[in-house]
């Protein structure tokens, strides 16, 4: 979608176009209300600015829609298709790596009370597992900031791809 087309959409149509980027309704509304944008770069800058204010509540809201790393996202909606594509490295991983990721996910959820979130696109299964293990050593505040950073990366990547 080009920026002019996005600017001209109704609120509901614009919502449908960006709904898959992140399950944070306030972010989507804020981005839609900020239209019109002079360029895709301006859209992405505003999207990033809005995402910088995210805290624990937004993280929890967004994570409700995220599958565990290594688990195949179900459904036919755009969010599920994107997750499957982004995690393709884990889908192709051998059984030992998949088992290690399952165990790591369990440990992470026990420690932090939420699913492990990482920008999977462009990372190998081994890289994701190494990051999971490293982040298990974080304290709660540090981990929350890392998870929010990953959430922003995922969101902006999906928005950028939508606008290409």
Image (cartoon, grey):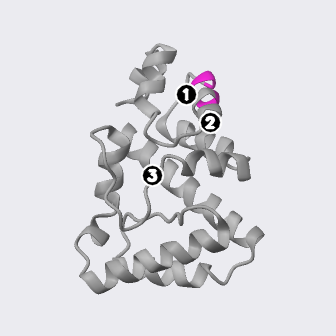
How far apart are labels 1 and 2 at the CA level? 16 Å
Task: Mark 2: give few (<14), some (14-19) or many (20+) Cα within 10 Å.
Answer: many
Earlier sequence position, callout 1 versus callout 3? 1
How far apart are labels 2 and 3 at the CA level? 15 Å
How far across and how far down the image is residue 13, in percent?
A: 42, 19
Q: Is residue 83 left or right of residue 28?
A: left
Earlier sequence position, callout 2 versus callout 3? 2
Q: Which residues are magenta?
A: 30-34
Q: Which residue is mark 2?
A: 27
Q: Residue at x 50, y 66 (%)?
A: 118
**Which quadrant, please, contains the N terminus?**
top left
Q: Which mark is residue 37?
A: 1
Q: Which mark is residue 157?
A: 3
Task: Mark 3: give few (<14), some (14-19) or many (20+) Cα within 10 Å.
Answer: some
How far across and how far down the image is residue 156, in percent?
A: 51, 49
Q: Main secondary structure of the magenta part?
A: helix
Looking at the rendered structure, the secondary structure element under dot 2 is helix
Looking at the rendered structure, the secondary structure element under dot 1 is loop
Pointers 2 and 3 in contact (C-beta within 8 Å): no
Which of label 1 and label 2 is nearer to you? Answer: 2
Q: Is residue 89 left or right of residue 117?
A: left
């Amino acid at each position: 979608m080009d920026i002019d087309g996005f600017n001209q959409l109704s609120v509901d149509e614009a919502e449908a176009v960006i709904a898959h980027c992140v399950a944070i309704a306030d972010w989507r509304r804020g981005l839609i209300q900020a239209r019109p944008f002079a360029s895709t770069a301006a859209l992405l800058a505003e999207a990033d600015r809005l995402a910088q204010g995210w805290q624990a509540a937004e993280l929890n809201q967004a994570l409700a829609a995220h599958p565990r790393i290594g688990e195949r996202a179900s459904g036919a909606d755009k969010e599920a298709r994107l997750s499957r594509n982004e995690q393709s490295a884990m889908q192709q991983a051998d059984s030992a790596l998949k088992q290690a990721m399952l165990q790591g996910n369990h440990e992470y959820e026990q420690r932090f009370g939420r699913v492990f979130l990482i920008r999977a696109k462009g990372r190998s299964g081994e890289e994701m597992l190494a990051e999971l293990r490293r982040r298990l050593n974080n304290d709660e505040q540090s981990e929350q900031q890392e998870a929010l950073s990953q959430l922003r990366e995922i969101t902006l990547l999906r928005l950028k791809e939508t606008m290409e």
